[in-house]
Amino acid sequence: MVKIIKSEFSKNVLTLMTGSTIAQILPIVLIPILTRLYSPEEFGVFAFYISLVTFLIVFSSGRYEQAIVLPKTDKQAINILSLSFVILFVVTFILSVILFFFGDFIQVKIENPILNNWIWFIPVCVFVASSYKIFTYWSNRKKRFKSTSISVLSQTSSRVSVQLIGGVSIKGMGSLGIIEFFKSLFKSDFILPVGLTPIGIASFIISYAVGFGLGSLLFFVSFFKNDRHLLKHISVLEMKTQAKRYDKFPKINSLHAMGDEFKNVGVNSVIIYAFSDVLLGYYSMTFRVLRAPLSVIGNSFAQVFYQKAAEMHSNNQSIVRLINGTVKKLALIALPIFLVILLFGPDLFEFVLGDKWREAGVYARYLTPWLFLNFVIAPIQQIAIILDKQAKIFMLSIVGNLIIFGSIFIGGYLFKDIKMGFLILSILQVFYYLYIYLWVSRIAKDAIKNTED
């Protein structure tokens, strides 16, 4: 056990988790407050808006940011980073032009007047979130996991701070002091909010931009301090060379990610149109509660795993033990948490978030098997990128996305019961992720065999 804790992999994971865990304490603590300041409808509409932004982020830098970790030399890597930003600037400009000419048409199609004023803010959200992703991969390449941890802390804490300020503005403190105001939220006669408010939607969207903007700024300061000497190696010729060398990222990996986001937008659209934005709010809150604490651990493992696996593969080392060890650690961490949700989900959600959120706890029960396996298996899927198996993992992702979207669609339009869709989804996802694990293990074994031959 001591040897495992002292390993470089575990130390890097713990470094990321330390800052990330602190960063997530605020959102977790504030969730019971935020659900009393914002309505389920507002959570649902924000989830829909961010699903649009996230879809655009998929191709905003050509997915080249994921290749930053792979080259052996920093000279190559700095040109990939530069290439990513060049593409991001171009995409952001084109997106702004499209919204300038077709913004009114898009507003009509979205059919949500409160979102109209925020359609123009989409390029800003895309730019800051994409910049954050690009710098994260650079920081991981340089093994500056402490810098990454600090950036995560700043990004998350600033987001929840803006949301808290906005929520207080909606309710209004009146003559109450700060302490008395927050105490009033938990009194038995407190009426939970319903409906949409302009301030509520604005608070969520601005918090997203402020969080990723601040995180990107901190990454940039670290980059400028430590790596500005590498800027002299940037050239158009080298960027073209790296773009061609890693062209599977825009050609295949971007399609993979785009499929994932099409699925997310599709699922959100089915839920909001087949049922209501209230139900979408419950669904998004289920993810928020279940994935907020675990995403800290999962993202930390994923980032360190990707860097370590890429390094081992470039040195012709077997990554099979790394895969199995990562899966076992994540399973042991997540199992107790998901068992509690499976057994006591509705009661926990009602007690912590308020009685209107009990339904989200019911959904959590149905989604637990899927989210558990997703948490455990997701990091090791990056092996497909490292071993140049992007086409295969893309095809598998299509199957997985069809399972998710198809299950929700069937529940919404055939059974008229979203819980039936969630049940079908979780059952099929168990078999799907078991296959993914076996496939990843096999290609990792084949890779080392091919090296020996």
Image: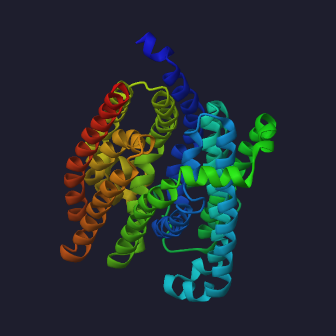
Residue drawn at the location 64% of the way across and 35% of the way down: 73
The answer to whether residue 328 shows anywhere in this view is no
Q: Colour mode?
A: rainbow
Give the camera-side residue of 291 and 142: 142
Between 209 and 392, the one lying in front of the other is: 392
- Say which residue appears at 63% left-offset and 80% top-offset: 98
Left or right of residue 112: residue 82: right
**Which quarter of the figure is the N terminus placed in?**
top left
Q: Which residue occupies 71% across, 60% down? A: 175
Residue 222 lies left or right of residue 387; in this view the side is: right
- Is residue 184 depicted above or below 293 in this figure? below
User: Residue 83: x, y in percent?
Assistant: 66, 54
Q: Nearer the viewer, residue 2 or 118?
A: 2
Q: Could you tell me if residue 332 is visible in this image?
A: yes
Query: Residue 369: percent from the left, percent from the top?
Result: 26, 46
On the image, the x and y values in percent for residue 300 come to 51, 36
Q: Residue at x 41, y 58 (%)?
A: 256
Residue found at the very far top of the displayed protein = 2
State whether residue 432 is above or below residue 274.
Answer: above
- Foreground pick, 426 / 100: 100
Give the image quarter of residue 423: bottom left
Residue 270, picture quadrant: bottom left
